[in-house]
Amino acid sequence: MFYHSMQDKSIERHNMRFCYAFRRFSDYPYIGNAFNMDPERITVKFLKRVNGMGFDGIELGMECLEKIDGGEKGAKEFAKKLNDNGVPLVAIRSGGLMIDPQSGQENYERIIRSFKFAKIFNSEVINGAISIPPKSPYLDTGSGLISSQLVTHNGLPFSQNSSRETTMPEYEMLAEKYISVSELASDYGLNISCEVHQNSPVDNSWSAKLIHKLVNKKNFGINPDLGNIVWNYDIPEESTEDAILELAPISNYWHCKNLTRVNHPENNRTVFLRETLMGGEIDYRFAVEAMFNSNYDGFMSIEGVFTGDQYYSDKMSLEYCKNLWEELEK
């Protein structure tokens, strides 16, 4: 394995690679979501379907990987199953705020544990959102799950644990953790990606650029998840076009989803509908061109829809994105 640094990118264009970071998980007779996944649910039937859709690999979380039975031998067998069906584990999800007094140390140690899995699976990137549970149980965070199957995010004028609430000393402490993680990850040839995420100190382009500057490691970059900017508040802090122009040059992994906002100004509230990538309010043609012109060579990782036939909808999104990149790569 080896990592690509933002500073060392050449002007040579690379064909884009696509990861399936599925959030809904429907594989008859099982229905649920992709968080806290049981690895036994990742069947050959599912893998063949994902491969047939045209994805180059998948993303799984540490909560799934640490449930694999049989230690290192079991992990190698699971990796072989993924690889034999053409769907390698290209990205590992391991997040959480590393400076939180209650869970920070465990969040840090879990990222370190992910490196051993990355070595076994030959993964390229460890991605993490640094959000934490709400500090106050009496306030709606504006981004909670409505149910285990149908996920709708509610935008409010406030967002707990946000960049608005984070001080410079906290960013400096967080950067120290990321420096440590990035240095250790470099021994494994891994990239570390910090996801722009709601209810997180890194929730917009300027906070992402700040943490990137403070860390200043070649294998550390940003995941410019534009959907998380859209649904963080009732009214987004910035346009997705402005955000991607700022973040494309420092990105090393990319979660993609699309949303339609339904604003209720009389209630200071917005609700969101999950869409295919060609639907919704985010202009992915603009975003893809911004990433292309910044010589982005990581994965475009499609998170997918929450309702209906996810495979049909997500394949449509994938084909749409492939067409966008092919137009630029000609």
Image: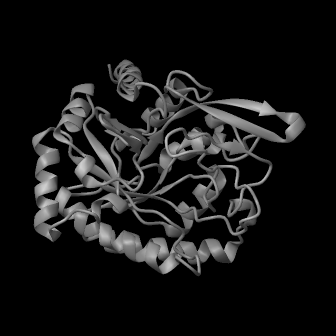
For residue 296, say whether it is visible: no
Q: Is residue 190 left or right of residue 258?
A: left
**Could you tell me residue 42's position as x and y percent?**
24, 46
Quadrant where the image shows the N terminus: bottom left
Q: Quadrant of residue 260?
A: top right
**Identity of the residue drawn at 78% across and 32% down:** 263
Q: Nearer the viewer, residue 89 or 14?
A: 89
Which residue reaches farthest front? 29
| Numbered label tally | 0
Q: Is residue 307 above or below residue 74?
A: above
**Could you tell me residue 237's position as x and y percent?**
73, 45
Q: Is residue 202 above or below residue 274?
A: below
Q: Quadrant of residue 160?
A: bottom right
**Identity of the residue drawn at 52% across and 32% down:** 287
**Could you tell me residue 163's position as x and y percent?**
69, 61
Quadrant where the image shows the C terminus: top left
Q: Is residue 125 left or right of residue 232?
A: left
**Identity of the residue drawn at 65% across and 54% down:** 206
Q: Is residue 71 left or right of residue 274?
A: left
Q: Quadrant of residue 108?
A: bottom left
Q: Is residue 160 above or below residue 179?
A: above
For residue 62, say whether it is visible: yes
Which residue reaches farthest right? 266
Q: Is residue 41 above or below residue 100?
A: above
